[in-house]
Amino acid sequence: MMEHAVRWPARLVCMLGLTILLVLIGLSWPDLEISLALEQSPLGWLQAAFLVACAAVAGALACQSEGRDAVGWCLIALAALAAALDERFMGHERVQEWLYYGWLQDVEDGLRWAQSVIAVYGLAGFVLLGWLWQRIDAQSRRWCLAAVLVGLAAVAMDLAFETVTAQMVEEVLEYLSEVLLLAGWFNEVGRRACRPH
């Protein structure tokens, strides 16, 4: 019974996230690029909302932790909030433009170098996974590993392709990565809440 109590919130998060995505796709059909590919699209708003939810759950995990672990979870919560702001206000896109027009415009493949700023998210995913690995249980690790792998696929899509279809796939992968991360952290909150004190 305890395992069921721990696991259902993560599954519910995934079902909710997938349902919202499918409804958005259904409502947008056949003009998917408007709802999925544009940076200020409904999917972009959902991504920011899930990142804020990740920040809130990381804050709850900070409250369930002590010492350096609590500080680490607080930093993760702040990073999730920063990522949500980046999603809504196109922060990394503005950094790319600044790099390209300010420094790399005359460099061969300068635009490609400027776009590589997004790789910072992939690196952050690995750092996050490394920090979490010893602090969360095996089931939560699997959720987080899946989130990082899907996120890396999104980064790879962003760097490798420049079509509207690739942009839509990349945005969907980013969203799914955030859903998986939130599910993993919900799983961890549930596990900690159900463990004997």
Image (spheres, rainbow, N blue to C red):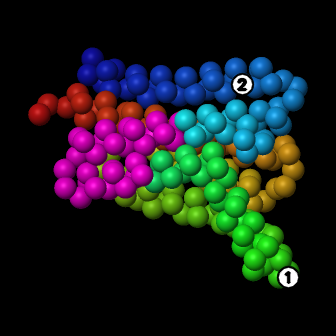
Asked which secondary structure carries label 2, the reply is: helix
Does the CB distance between marks 2 and 1 fall below 8 Å? no
Asked which secondary structure carries label 1, the reply is: loop
Q: What number is the disc on residue 24?
A: 2
| Residue 123 located within the stretch drawn in magenta | no
Identified at 75% across, 66% down, the residue is 97
Q: Position of residue 79 (x, y in %)?
A: 46, 54
- Crowding at mark 2 (Cα within 10 Å: few <14, some 14-19, many 20+): some
Identified at 74% across, 60% down, the residue is 159
Magenta-highlighted residues: 50-78
| Residue 60 located within the stretch drawn in magenta | yes
Residue 149 in sight here: no
Identified at 75% across, 80% down, the residue is 103
Tell me the quarter of the image containing the C terminus. Answer: top left
Q: Position of residue 156 (x, y in %)?
A: 70, 57
Q: Position of residue 15 (x, y in %)?
A: 55, 23
Q: Nearer the viewer, residue 49 or 122?
A: 49
Q: Nearer the viewer, residue 39 or 25?
A: 39
Task: Give the mark, 2 or 1, whose residue is nearer the N terminus.
Answer: 2
- Crowding at mark 1 (Cα within 10 Å: few <14, some 14-19, many 20+): few
Q: Main secondary structure of the magenta part?
A: helix
Direction from residue 12 to residue 162 in the image, left or right: right
Q: What number is the disc on residue 106?
A: 1
Task: Identify the amino acid type marked 2.
Answer: Leu
Q: Position of residue 33 (x, y in %)?
A: 83, 37
CA gap, disc 2 to disc 1?
41 Å
Q: What number is the disc on residue 3?
A: none
Tell me the quarter of the image containing the N terminus. Answer: top left
